[in-house]
């Protein structure tokens, strides 16, 4: 086979892969990320708890990581005070390698999530804050076509620390 034919076949194969993965990303766009606060005013000594929820509103199962660890594991928060300054991250850093046991199949119409205390991860002194979450996976795990890849941004919430 000539080099020109190999290049043409490579381009065709690459285009087919892009189409396949592009379709998966469009289908997976039915995933939604939500934040739910328990209240919007906190004393400086109180835990600042919120729920992080992902909903699969699509027709297909998707494969997602089972862990929600802020900053180092697909989930991060944008927390800014009323002057636009980012809240400093003070949590532990995790460098984990996923195996197939760290993934779960999320069925259509399913809702999963966790409860987090923001004070375990961020330095939040007195003031007004705005926050939203980003859930992002940029690489497929173990070459599984059903592993979701993409970026979700949550709703924005506001809270005050007194």
Image (tube, rainbow, N blue to C red):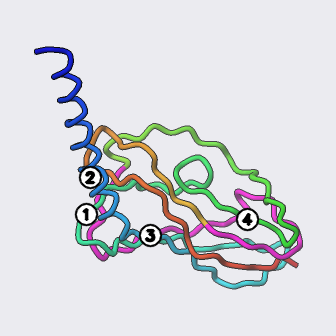
Asked whether residue 64 is drawn in magenta, I would say: no
Residue tagged 2:
146
What secondary structure is marked by label 2? loop
Residue at horizontal 30%, vertical 77%?
109
Rendered location of residue 96, percent (x, y): 50, 39
What secondary structure is marked by label 4? strand
Tag 2 or tag 1, which sits nearer the N-term?
1
Toward the viewer: 99 or 133? 133
What secondary structure is marked by label 3? strand
Q: Which is more foreground, mark 3 or mark 2?
A: 2
What secondary structure is marked by label 1? loop
Residue tagged 1:
61
114 is higher (above) or lower (below) than 8: below
Check contact, mark 1 vs mark 2: CB within 8 A.
yes
Residue tagged 4:
79
C-alpha separation, residue under disc 3 versus residue under disc 4: 19 Å
Q: Residue furthest left?
A: 1
Q: Tell me where the magenta segment starts and ends, as one range.
A: 103-132
Toward the viewer: 81 or 123? 81
C-alpha separation, residue under disc 3 versus residue under disc 2: 17 Å
118 is higher (above) or lower (below) than 161: above
Check contact, mark 4 vs mark 2: CB within 8 A.
no
Rendered location of residue 21, percent (x, y): 29, 50
State which quadrant residue 39 falls in. Answer: bottom right
Check contact, mark 3 vs mark 2: CB within 8 A.
no
Tag 4 or tag 1, which sits nearer the N-term?
1
């Amino acid at each position: 086979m000539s080099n020109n034919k190999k290049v043409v076949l490579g381009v065709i194969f690459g285009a087919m892969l892009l189409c396949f993965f592009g379709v998966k990303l469009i289908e997976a766009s039915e995933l939604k990320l939500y934040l739910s606060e328990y209240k919007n005013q906190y004393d400086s000594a109180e835990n600042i708890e919120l729920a992080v929820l992902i909903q699969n509103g699509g027709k297909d199962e998707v494969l997602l990581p089972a862990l929600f660890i802020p900053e180092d594991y697909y989930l991060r928060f944008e927390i800014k005070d009323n002057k636009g300054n980012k809240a400093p991250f003070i949590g532990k850093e995790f460098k984990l390698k996923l195996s197939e046991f760290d993934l779960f199949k999320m069925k259509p119409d399913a809702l999963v999530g966790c409860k987090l205390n923001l004070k375990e991860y961020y330095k939040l002194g007195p003031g007004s804050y705005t926050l939203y979450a980003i859930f992002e996976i940029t690489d497929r795990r173990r070459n599984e076509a059903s592993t979701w890849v993409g970026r979700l941004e949550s709703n924005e919430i506001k809270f005050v620390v007194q």
